[in-house]
Each structure stands twice: as C-alpha cells, then as structure tokens.
Image (cartoon, rainbow, N blue to C red):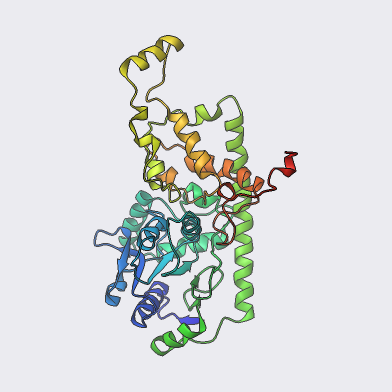
Amino acid sequence: MIIPVENRNTLKAVQVFLKALLESGAVELIMTPMRTHAGTVVPSLVSNPDLLEAADPLAPVLPVNGATLAGKLSVKEPRAKVGVVLRACELRALVELTKMQQASLDNLVLIAIDCAGTTSVPVHQRLTSAQNGSDAEQPLWQEFFKAAIEHPESPKVELRPACKVCEQPVFNRLRPQDIAIHLLGSDNGQELHVTLPAELAAKIAEKMGLSQPPSEEQADSRKQALEKLISARIATRDAEFAAMRARLEGPEGITGVFSACIRCHNCMTVCPICYCKTCVFKSAIFDHDPMQFVAWAQQKGAYRLPSDTILFHLTRLNHMALSCVGCGMCTEACPSELPVGMVFRAIGQRVQANFEYVPGRNLEDPLPLVTFKADEWEEVGE
C-alpha cells in the first residue's frame, strides 16, 4: 500500500497513518516514540489521535528496548488492543519474551518499521540541537537512511556499536494482522510504502486515500538496498566478532575485557531478555562478611573489588546467549563503556549456531534449553 507524502515530509505521513489506525478502531492505543518539549524522544502510550503529531518513530535513537514495555502492556489480563511501533531488534526481543511467557501477542498489533541504525541518546541530543540551529536540508533520520544506502561499508553517521553489526534491519511480519512500514529502498520523500491487512487497508483508505501496492520495480529497489546494507553489516560484524574473540581467547581473556566492571547491574536492568523478578545478584548471597574479603585477600595477596564481577557476567551469558538479539542496550547503559553487547553477540552467535536457533525469527521455534526431546542425546552417543 502506498501513502502519498506531501512536501517530502515522510514523518508527517507516518503520523497521519498512525492517527488513522487509532481513529479507525483498529487499535485502542498506540505505543510509539514521541518527542518531548525538551527535544528528547521517549516511548509513550497514546490514546488521543491528535497527540500523535508529536510521534517520532523515525528518530534514529533507541533510549530503551520497547519489547520490555510491550511485555508489561500485554502479559496480564485484562488488556487493551495496542499497536506497538517497534524496530526489528525490539520485535525480535518481544518474540523471545512471548516464548518465555513474559509477553503476549494476543492483543498486540505489531507495527514494524525499517531501521537504518541508531545513535546513542547523548549523541542524538547533540545532533538534534545542532540541526535545530542550522538550515539542514534533510531531517536527521534521513541522514541515517541515506548513509545506510549510499555508504553501508562506512556510514557517515555516528551509529551505536550494535547497529554497525546489525544484519537484521527489517522485521518480517509474523501474522496477517501485523503491519510493516517500509523505508529502505524507496523514495521516502515522495511516498511511504506500508504492508497491512486488506480489510484494514480498506478502512484506512477512506481516511487517507491509499493507492495501489508497490510495483515490482519498487520491490526490486528495496531488495537491492537491503542486500547491499546487510552484506556490508555482515562484513563489519564478522570483523568485530573476530577481534572480540581474539581478546576473549587471548592473554587478556574475559577477565581483562570486563576488568573495569563496577557491578552496577545496569546491563542487566536494560536487557529486554533479562526478566527474572528475583535475581541472585540482587540478593544477600553476595553481601559477604568483612572477614571473608580479608581471608580472600590474605589467601591471594590481593583481591579485586567489587567482587564477583566475572561471575555476574558469566551467569548472564548462560541465561542470555541463546536469546540475545543484539540490541546493544547493555553497552549503552555501561558507565565503564565496556563492550558488553559485543561480547554477548560474539559468544551468542556460536551458541545459537550450535542449536541452529535464531532468536526472534518466529514464534514456532522452541527455546532449545527449555524443550525436552527424548532422543536429544543420541547424537553424542548417550
């Protein structure tokens, strides 16, 4: 479905489309990033269509993985029918949370939006402030999409580390009732391509005057753009993973990589997959008696403080490696600027390959470590 764009204002077209979804009764509320008066962009739950004039799902920033928020909106009953506007990494995390019974898709309409990559919150605020004070020819989000298409091997924008190695910038619709907003590979200044159910399209058409589906030529353009971007991202990913594995497997080891950890638990707090309500690392089990620290220091000659940092990360790796979607929130939240996300992705890639598991691919793939198979040990001779 094609939505006309007036005055090359693609964001306005997205806002009008979201407003039409709400007014048509397709959803009761919409969860989407919204601009604040301070210029920041934060996830918000909107019931008033008029307020969607402040919606900004195109902003190249990811302050929080929205899967966590969507899970809280859907996991318990009663619940409203909510349309959630999310990027690919957020949707893949939401799929994983659904498998873990920490979210439900029953009353959610997934609105997938293409992502050319995001920058950190502080950088986004700086870039936005700089652009507001200049005569910029194009919005900030368009700079990121232009860089992704024209310079995928070396983007001319300040991408987060996780985005530089993200080989899944788009999300394939899981169900017929879900919606996809396509931005990569089309002239966003002229038209906006949207995939949505035919019955819903008929309702929206009355309000917006939607035209015919994209032509084969337009579909080919999108396919070529995605192949080029994904190929470049995979090359960057493989190089980054090789470098990280060299560190982890070399003299530095995982202890060295995480040597500056202060065990603040920020990475655990922001991780969309880390959902345990009761966590051993937030319990009294690690509140060691003073003389225990003295004993360890006397035994080894010196004892690192704070303690148990490596145990913390190894435990998280055991819990998260299979379902890590590579959103990079952990890296963003680390005050010591540790490459937490790159470690998890580099290790997670091998773990996921061993189980032939792709996190967030679909709802039918069972979680390997919680699924029993009577013959699962036959391959190793047991």
Q: Which residue is pictured at 50% across the width and 81% down the height?
A: 2
- Residue 196 appears in view: yes
382 and 46: which is toward the camera: 382
- In this picture, is 170 found above or below 309? below
Q: Is residue 35 left or right of residue 140?
A: left
Residue 206 in which image quadrant: bottom left
* Image quadrant where residue 350 sits: top right
118 to the left or right of 49: right
- Quadrant in which the C terminus is drawn: top right
Farthest left residue in view: 37
Residue 275 in the image, given as x and y percentages of width and height: 41, 48
Image x and y of residue 124, in percent: 37, 54
Relative vertical location of residue 50 with respect to residue 297 in this rendering, above or below:
below
Q: Residue at x 47, y 35 (%)?
A: 313
Residue 73 drawn at (x, y percent):
35, 62
Q: Nearer the viewer, residue 54 or 304?
A: 304
* Count of numbered badges drawn on the protein: 0
Question: Does the image show residue 138?
Answer: no
- Along the line of sight, the residue nearer the viewer: 92 or 250: 92
Q: Position of residue 241 (x, y in %)?
A: 60, 42
